[in-house]
Amino acid sequence: MVAERFPSFGLATPPAPRAIGADDGIALLKGGQAKPASLLAYGNGRSYGDSCQNETGTVVDMRPLNRIHAFNAETGLLEADAGVLLSDIIAYAAPYGFFPAVVPGTQFVTLGGAIANDVHGKNHHRRGTFGCHVATLTLLRSDGRTRRCSATDNARLFRATIGGMGLTGLILSASIRLMRVPSLDIVETATPFRDLGEFFGLAEAADQANEYAVAWIDQLAGGRNSGRGLLFTGNHAEHGSHAASRAGGNLSVPVQPPFNVLNRPFLTAFNAAYRWKKGRTTAPRQVGYQGFFFPLDGVRDWNRLYGPKGLFQHQSVVPEETASEAVPALLAAARRAGQGSFLTVLKRFGSIRSPALLSFPCPGYTLTLDFPNRGAATLALLRELDRITIEAGGGVNPYKDARMGADIFASSFPEWPRLEGLRDPAFMSSFWARTAKKLDMRHGAVEAAE
């Protein structure tokens, strides 16, 4: 296989040096042949960092495992291979009046990837994470055994695999619970806010009244306009389409430009245009689900616009009690560094617990920023964002990360030794190698495994 087919979405880390197909990976694990130094499942490469990379080992391309096996139109229980894309699940279930209970910002993630990263969406306050809706999963370990895992069968492996970033073995298939919806269309309302204080005053009420809520922040605005933005709320329309629209748009970035197109002048103009277009009416309007949930999917390979050095994404979560200070501090740090974020997203997480051992969302507010890779200056900014986040009692998202230090990971996820204790010894990722494996884990990991 060609290594260039297996990059991370951020394009700031090296692509996988070695790759094999899903059938070969399964045969390797079941057959007892000599195994590579390490393995890691690769879904559709939508992780921004190196949690989907295995720099010293081999990745297993899971995309050929892409069949939907069963669907119960009464209960919404769907069983499918790990390589099925969420876009395929949406298209399959839509005519029956069902939709995934949780979707991330792109529909081009695999089912296995959504489980392994325990992804979240715009309705965490109502539905929790993706892992909350996994009924069962089938896991192949390097001992050659296939295990059916659920909350009652192989429960420890079940919890470790959800949010386990592919480190517990190959997820072959899963059964998930979809939610019934009156239509795929969304009734969206955009509410402008002057600053973050006004946003925090709106956020809890917005969550209570709506299935979906998310805010866009004009990250470059400073002075009296600092923290201004738009709060988007939405609910499935009572009367709307029951047919999935074509996944992805007609636009694409066919080649990677030799420089970063998303520079500060472009971002300033983009933010002004976006704020005008989206905020010109506060009346509810019915929109298609693609534009509401997956706006960036409308331009294929849009990540190429960041140029050959790629981008870094930083997603943090901070508790409610520190958010009013931490979120403005994060935005101010980016402005001081002269770095512009293409899309800056702020959401409120609810209190629904995930079954996962390690899951990024927790009660509070999550801020997502992305920056072109400018080398040392960008890395210095990201370290400052890490510092602000940890001092506020928060954490940094590992599956959006390509450079956090082991200390930041340990502070974000103090129970990481429990995952290390259940990690399949034949599986490794570049992320885990540069964080958890650099920590002195022997005592904690052994205790967690016993």
Image (spheres, rainbow, N blue to C red):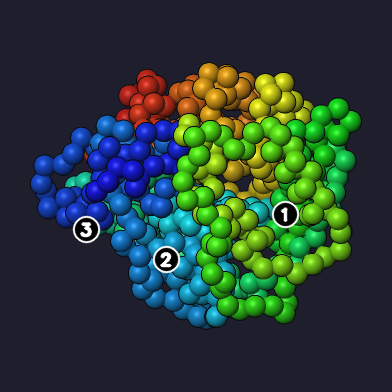
Percent of width and height locating residue 44? 41, 52
Residue drawn at the location 56% of the way across and 34% of the way down: 260
Name the foreground residue: 263 vs 47: 263
The answer to whether any part of residue 306 appears in the image is: yes
State which quadrant residue 330 falls in. Answer: top right
The residues bearing labels 2 and 1 have C-alpha atoms spaced at a distance of 27 Å
Q: Amino acid at mark 2?
A: Ser
Q: Amino acid at mark 1?
A: Ala
Of circles 3 and 2, the one toward us is: 3
- Badge 2 marks a residue whose secondary structure is strand
The residue where tag 3 is placed is 23
Name the foreground residue: 412 vs 335: 335
The residue where tag 1 is placed is 213
The residue where tag 2 is placed is 175
State which quadrant residue 229 falls in. Answer: top right
Asked if the residue at tag 2 contacts the one at tag 3, i.e. Cβ–Cβ closer than 8 Å, the answer is no
The answer to whether any part of residue 425 appears in the image is: no
The residues bearing labels 1 and 3 have C-alpha atoms spaced at a distance of 40 Å
- Badge 1 marks a residue whose secondary structure is strand
Of circles 2 and 1, the one toward us is: 1
Q: Amino acid at mark 3?
A: Asp
- Badge 3 marks a residue whose secondary structure is helix
